Image: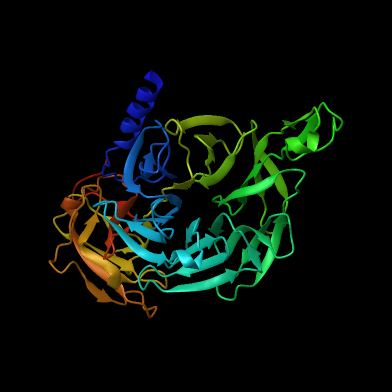
């Protein structure tokens, strides 16, 4: 009776998570945790501080699987829906968006149960499109229009698991190709669906599972250790087995010689492979990499930090009792780097910090950055964050005559906080979609006329 009471108390504690608002910082970890102990306890999206291991529940989700973080900080999650033993049909699977500012959830796409779709991992391209793996292929989803298109499907691609997008916009996927038993890391053109093999797993050496791309373009894979089963005792002693019936009479089927799982680095151009770090016999699943190249892996109930140079391992966090983690993402640096021109037309940007005048600054438009998307009310210049001098925030003009519109604004010098000896000045702000940006330009500070510099 005491044991039952203890379990009930534990369920109550674990089921009473309080959802908290979180401001994501670059390098933070976000994981999905499915429901556990009882289907009455929701799954959750959990924020983890990589330095302290402190966990904070961001949102409760029925049965979360994969997760990805958009450029504006929105979270996209694949959800298999609530468990319902009394329902005549299984629930719909969904792709949902979670607004961190409010915690509100909105369904992007729902997949009816009869479509037999089980969305798993998610990757986001530079245009904000979602690419989702599911048991029979890969979908592209436009979160704005909610249009769904098929990129690759069965029987050409079978049971794709993890997915990432490289610098060229190609999809890099762990999957089986039709007719193959081993999993392959395959490159897929998102427009044509054409594919090419990068590297294939060695079944004797382990199974490919999660995949990530480091800042240098190399692929990082979690590889599960192979498990061998042999008969102990009986007439089949020493022979391979899959279950106890293979070892009768008088024998038992056991796992033996279980090797270590490991993190594998793969050059996507040559296929060359290097082991980064080995992990005790484990259940390595997903993997993520931060902007510095530091590696974070899920080992069923643990999160480990792996040094990419030495392979040294550090424990970060553990899931709650009787639960595990499904997927992991590292919060990227959301800030867009823009091109700035202080004192347009001048080769040397001289600034007198004590001047009562203004500093003209041009945000230069480019093929990747349209100044029409700038929220001018958010513009600030210098260490003290001076606002634009004019209420309209600036005016559009092609300042460098390259055929693209630029944004010219002016800032009171004394309000910027630029100090003698500073060698650069920066302007930052946000787009209308809330994405932060920043640009800097070199300056030379000069003393006021008639005052000698020390």
Outermost top residue: 2
Quadrant for residue 242, please give it: top right
Is 122 situated left or right of 218 in this image? left
Q: Is residue 303 above or below residue 430?
A: above
- Can residue 169 be seen here? The reply is no
Residue nearest the viewer, comparing 280 with 70 = 280
Residue nearest the viewer, comparing 254 with 136 = 254
Is 309 situated left or right of 292 in this image? right
Q: Is residue 92 above or below residue 152?
A: above
| Image x and y of residue 49, in percent | 38, 36
Q: Name the residue located 73 percent from the left edge and 31 percent from the top edge.
A: 254
- Can residue 211 be seen here? The reply is yes
Residue nearest the viewer, comparing 335 with 104 = 104
| Image x and y of residue 89, in percent | 43, 60
Q: Name the residue located 35 percent from the left edge and 58 percent from the top edge.
A: 97
How is this picture coloured? Answer: rainbow
| Image x and y of residue 450, in percent | 18, 50
Position of the C terminus by quadrant: top left
Is 135 situated left or right of 406 in this image? right
Is 6 situated left or right of 235 in this image? left
Q: Is residue 277 above or below residue 31?
A: above
Position of the N terminus by quadrant: top left
How many tags in the picture? 0
Outermost bottom residue: 403
Q: Name the residue located 80 percent from the left edge and 33 percent from the top edge.
A: 248
Quadrant for residue 81, please give it: bottom left
């Amino acid at each position: 009776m005491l044991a039952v009471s203890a379990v009930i108390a534990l369920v109550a504690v674990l089921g009473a998570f309080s959802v908290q608002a979180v401001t994501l910082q670059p390098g933070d970890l976000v994981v999905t945790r499915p429901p556990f102990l009882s289907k009455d306890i929701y799954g959750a999206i959990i924020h983890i501080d990589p330095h302290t291991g402190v966990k904070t529940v961001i949102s409760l989700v029925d049965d979360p699987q994969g997760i990805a973080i958009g450029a504006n900080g929105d979270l996209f999650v694949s959800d298999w829906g609530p468990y319902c033993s009394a329902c005549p049909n299984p629930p719909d699977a969904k792709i949902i968006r979670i607004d961190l500012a409010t915690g509100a959830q909105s369904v992007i796409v729902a997949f009816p149960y009869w479509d037999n779709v089980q969305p798993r991992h998610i990757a986001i391209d530079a245009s904000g499109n979602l690419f989702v793996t599911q048991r029979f292929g890969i979908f592209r989803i436009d979160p704005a229009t909610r249009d769904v298109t098929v990129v690759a499907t069965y029987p050409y691609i079978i049971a794709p698991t993890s997915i990432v997008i490289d610098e060229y916009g190609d999809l890099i996927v762990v999957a089986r190709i039709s007719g193959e038993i081993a999993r392959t890391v395959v490159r897929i053109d998102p427009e044509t669906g054409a594919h090419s093999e990068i590297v294939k797993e060695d079944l004797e050496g382990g199974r490919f599972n999660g995949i990530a791309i480091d800042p240098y373009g190399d692929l990082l894979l979690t590889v599960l250790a192979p498990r061998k089963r042999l008969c102990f005792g009986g007439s089949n002693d020493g022979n391979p087995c899959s279950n106890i019936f293979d070892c009768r009479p008088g024998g038992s089927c056991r796992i033996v010689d279980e090797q270590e799982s490991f993190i594998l680095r793969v050059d996507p151009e040559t296929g060359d492979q290097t082991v980064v770090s080995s992990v005790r016999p484990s259940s390595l699943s997903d993997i993520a990499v931060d902007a510095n190249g530091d590696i974070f892996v899920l080992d069923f109930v643990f999160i480990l930090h792996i040094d990419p140079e030495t392979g040294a391992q550090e424990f970060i966090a553990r899931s709650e009792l009787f639960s595990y983690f499904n997927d992991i993402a590292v919060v990227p640096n959301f800030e867009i780097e823009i091109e700035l021109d202080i004192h347009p037309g001048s080769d040397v940007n001289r600034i007198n910090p004590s001047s009562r005048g203004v500093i003209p600054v041009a945000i230069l438009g480019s093929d990747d950055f349209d100044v029409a998307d700038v929220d001018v009310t958010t513009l600030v210049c210098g260490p003290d964050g001076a606002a634009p001098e004019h209420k309209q925030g600036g005016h559009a003009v092609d300042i460098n005559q390259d055929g693209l519109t630029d944004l010219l604004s002016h800032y009171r010098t004394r309000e910027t906080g630029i100090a003698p000896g500073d060698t650069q000045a920066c302007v930052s702000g946000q787009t209308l979609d809330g994405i932060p940006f920043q640009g800097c330009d070199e300056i030379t500070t000069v003393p006021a006329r008639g005052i000698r510099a020390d």
